[in-house]
Amino acid sequence: MSTERLARLLALVVALALGVVLGLGASRARAAAPGEGDGARPRPAGCDVIHSLSTLGEDQRGLLLQACEQGPQVSAATYAAIFRLVSSSSWHAGVVGTILRRHGVSSLTAWADGGRHDPPAALVVQQTMEAAFDDFEAGRVCRELRDSPELGEFLDAVGSDEEPAELPFTSRFASCLGVPLSGMEGTRLLTVRADGLEDVTVVMGTRDFVHARRFERTEALHLGSHRFFVIAVPEASPVAVFANHENQELPVAWRGLMGRNTVIWAPPPRRSCLDMSVLMNAGTHLYIDGVRVDGGPPDDVCAKPVPEDAPPVKVDRTVAVTLDHRGSGLPDHEIAALVCEDDKPVVRHLSAVAATAPSDQLRRSGECDTLRLDLGTPDRQRVALLGVTKLPGCEATPLWASDVQERVRQVLRSDLAHHRDRDYANFSAYAEASEALASLESRMGRPDAADDDGPDRGADANALLGSAAQEAWRQGIDTLLSFAVQCTPRGEGARGEPQWAYSIRGTAIQVSELFARGYYSRDGIDLEDFIDVESVGFVAAEQQDAAVGALLDRVFEVPTPRFTDAPVEAPYRQRRTLRVSTYVATTEAASRAPEELSISYKPFSRVGSRRAVGEELSSREGPPVPGHVERPRLCEALVNRGARSSESVEQAAARFAELPGAEEGWPLVLRRSREELDVSSNPRAVVYQGEVLPPRPGWYLVVVRGRRNTIEDAVCIQATAPAMDLWAEMYISGGPLAFAPNGSRADIYLRPRLGLTRYLGVRWLGVGITAGYGFTRYSGTRGDWKDLEVAEQERLVWKRHALLLGPHVELRGRSTRLPVEPRARLGVVTDTGIVAIGGVDDALVEFRRGSPDDVVLDFDLDLDVDLGLGIPLGRIQLVHMVSLSYVAIDDSLRRSATQVTQDANLYVGYTIAVAGGRR
C-alpha cells in the first residue's frame, strides 16, 4: 500500500472517530435521561426588569434591553456591560441568562476590544471535558478516579447534604478526560450540584473577555443518584451562577472569585420565606431577583394603558427565598417595582432583602420574614420626622423645644394648609439617617467644609442618607424632615431680664422626588439637590407654634398666607405689630413679589360685640371676672397660630361679612419686612409687617385674603382698656372763684383726693368711690344781729378741715383718633368737717353757735362736677380739669350765713390729677 493511500485511510479513520465523539456530545445536549426532560417547564422571561439594574448606567441598560428584545450583539460595549454585572455583588448578572433563554442561545462571548479571537483556554478545557463526560459516566475513561474512594466519599457527603472533605473534580480529573496539564494553567474547575435544577447559567469575566453559558439539565454529569455541572473558569475571575430549581419560583444565585477549585451547593442553600403584603397602583410590575411575582404576564410595563380609575392591586403571598450563613456566596435578594410614566418604564421602588445572616440569626424552617410595602399613589403626602436637635445655648431660655415634634404633627394633621395634602407618618429607619443629615447640613452652604472633612466624609454621608431615603421610600414615606432649634442672646430687657432670638431650621429630604428622578440608577443625580433647608426666626417663646407653621409652609411650598405672631391683646393706645408669612408660588413671581400686602379688620361692635359677649355669658361657668371683656368664642378658635382649623377660618370669614361696616373692612397696609429674622435664603419666602392702632378698646377681627380674594387666615386682637382706674388729684379754688349765696366768705379752698373708678363692659362708663381731705380758710366780720352789742373788732378768721367721702359716676372718651381723652365726672360727697373757731371772739356767742370750745363739728353734703382732658403718658395719664364744687348744699337754703357752720359755696377751680389703670 502506498504512503499516499495509507495517509488517506488514516484521515478517514480520524474523521469517523471525531464524528462519533461529536455525535455523542450532540446527543448529550439534545436527549434527556428518562423522565428528566418532561419535568422541565418553560420560564417566562421579561426584559422590563433590566430598567431596575442600578449597577449599570443608562446607556448600558439600553444596550442590554435591546439585546433582550432583539438578540445579543457581540461588541466592546456588550463586554463592558456584562463585566460590570458579573463584578457586582448583586443578582444582576442573571439577566444575561434571561437574554440567552429568550433567544435560544446557549452561550455568548464578548471581547474587551470588540474583535473576534480564538476560544479562551477555559472554553477549550470545557469542550474537551464535555466530549468525554459520557465515557466517564460509563466508566470507559478515568476508571481509577471513577471507582476511587475519594469520589465515593464525595458522593456520600453530597447525599448527606454535607460539605465534602475533598473535591475529586480537579486538574487530575480534567487530565484523565484528555485535557493536557499545560491546558489547565490559569484554569479552575467549578462544580455545581445540579439535583433538581432545570438549567444553570454561568457568567464569568476577565479583563480580556466575558463569557456566559447556559446549561440544560440534560447536560449534567450523572454520578450515582446525583447530577453535577463541572465548569472550567479562568483563575481569579469573578463568576456568577444562576440556576432555576424545578420546585422554586426564584432562581438560586451564587457569586464569587475563583481562586481554587470549588464546589457549590453540595449542602443545598438554606431556605426561608418572605411573607409579602404589597399595595400598589394598577399597572405596576413587581419583581424579586428579576422574576415577576405579582401574578402578571412577563410583558412590557408600558404595553397596555392603565385606566385612571383602575383600583389598586394588593399582592399577598409567601415567596421562598434563600437565607444562609455569611460566606455562602449568596447575593442579596432585590425587590423592584416598575411603573410606566411618560410611555417609559420607571423604577417606583427598589430595595434589598438579605440572603445571608450570622449563624445565630438564621431562621428556622417555616419562619418567614415580613415585608410590608405601600407603593400606591397616596391621596396625601406622607411626612416623617427624623428628630429635633436643640443646639447648645437653648437650655437657659424659656423656649421649650422638646415638643417640636408634637407641634409638627399637630400642624400636619390639623392646619388648613396641610391636613388635606399631608399625613404625619412614623419612620422606623436606620439610626444613621440623623447622622447623615447632620453631616450634610454642616457641609451645605460652606464651600470649604468638604476640605475640612476629607474626601470620603461627604460620600459616606451621602451613602448613609441614601440608605435612609431608600428605607423611607420602602415604607411609603414621601418626605423626611429634621429640625434644629437655635437660641441667640440679644441683650437685656427693661427689667434686666435676658432677651433671646430663636430660629428653627428645617431640613427636608424630598424622597418621592428623589426616586421619581431615578435615584436608583444614580445617573448624574446629586443627593443634595433633593435636600431643602429652610428656617424661620422669632423673638418670643410663645411664637413657636406660628414659627413651626410658617416653616412647614416654606418646606412644602404652600402659598397660603399665615398670621405668625399677632399679639392677642395689648393696651388700646399701644400700637401692635402684625406679621404675615407667605410663600410665592413661582420663582419668576418672587422677583416681582409686591412690597406691600393689604389686610382688613373690623371691630366686634354693636351687633357683633353684643352677640360675642352673649355667647360667652351663656356658655361660661362661674362668676364673671371683674373688668374683663369676654373673648368672643370665634376668637378662642383662632388663638392657635400653628394648627389653624378650616372650620375656624370659615367661621371667621362668615362673621367678618356679618360685622357692621364696609364689606372689605378697614384696610391696613403691611410692608415687606427686611429684618434679619425675616430674610430667607429662599427668595420665594416673604414676610410682611405693619402696625395697627385700633380706634377704641374692644375685640377686632383681622383677615388676610389670598390669591382668589378669599379669606385664608384670620386672627383676633384685643385693644384693652383698664377696668380699674386709680387716680390722685389736687383741687384749688377760693377768693373770687368762690360764690356764696348766703354771704359766706372763703379765702382759699384746697382739696386733695384719691379715687377708684371701675369701668363697666363698655369701658366709657364707670362708677367708683372718692375719698379726700378738704381745707377751707374763711374770713369776715360778725355774722349775726344778736351780736351787735359786741364792740367792733378786727376781721374774724376761722378754718375748716373736712373728710370727704362719696360715690361718683364717670364718662370717659376712649378714641385713639385723639391724642387726649375727655373725662367728665359727677360725684356726691358726704362732708364731715371740723371748724376751728379759735380766732373768733368768745363774745360772738351766736356766731360761734354758743359753743364754749374752739372746735365745732359740721356735717354737709357736697356736689362735684369735673370736666377735663387726660394726656396719656405711657401707663399713666396726666389729667387737667375744670371743677365745679357746690359745697354744703344743705346750707344754701339759708338767706345769710349767721354762723361759722353755715358755709355754702360754689367753687370754680382747677384740678390736676394723675391716673393709672389696671386690668
Image (cartoon, rainbow, N blue to C red):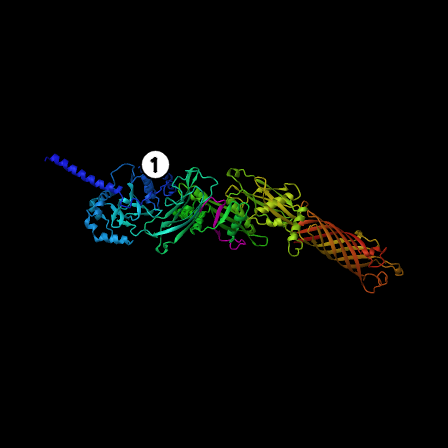
Question: Where residue 906 appears, x then y in whole percent?
Answer: 80, 53
Q: What residue is drawn where x is 28% and y is 54%?
A: 160
Region rendered in magenta: 374-400
Q: Is residue 93 visible?
A: no
Q: Taking 26 as reference, is 863 left or right? A: right
In the picture, the quarter occupied by the C terminus is bottom right
Q: Is residue 42 visible?
A: yes
Q: Quadrant of residue 100?
A: top left
Between 239 and 263, the residue placed more toward the observer is 263
In the picture, the quarter occupied by the N terminus is top left
Instruction: Indicate the secondary structure of the residue bearing disc 1.
Output: helix
Residue type at numbered disc 1: Gln
* Crowd band around label 1 with a 10 angstrom C-alpha radius: few (<14), some (14–19), many (20+): few
Question: Where residue 458 appears, x then y in whole percent?
Answer: 41, 47
Question: Where residue 307 appears, x then y in whole percent?
Answer: 46, 39
Residue, disc 1: 70
Between 136 and 863, the residue placed more toward the observer is 136
The residue most toward the right is 789
Q: Is residue 918 magenta?
A: no
Q: Quadrant of residue 165?
A: bottom left
Between 636 and 758, the residue placed more toward the observer is 636
Q: Is residue 115 above or below residue 217?
A: above
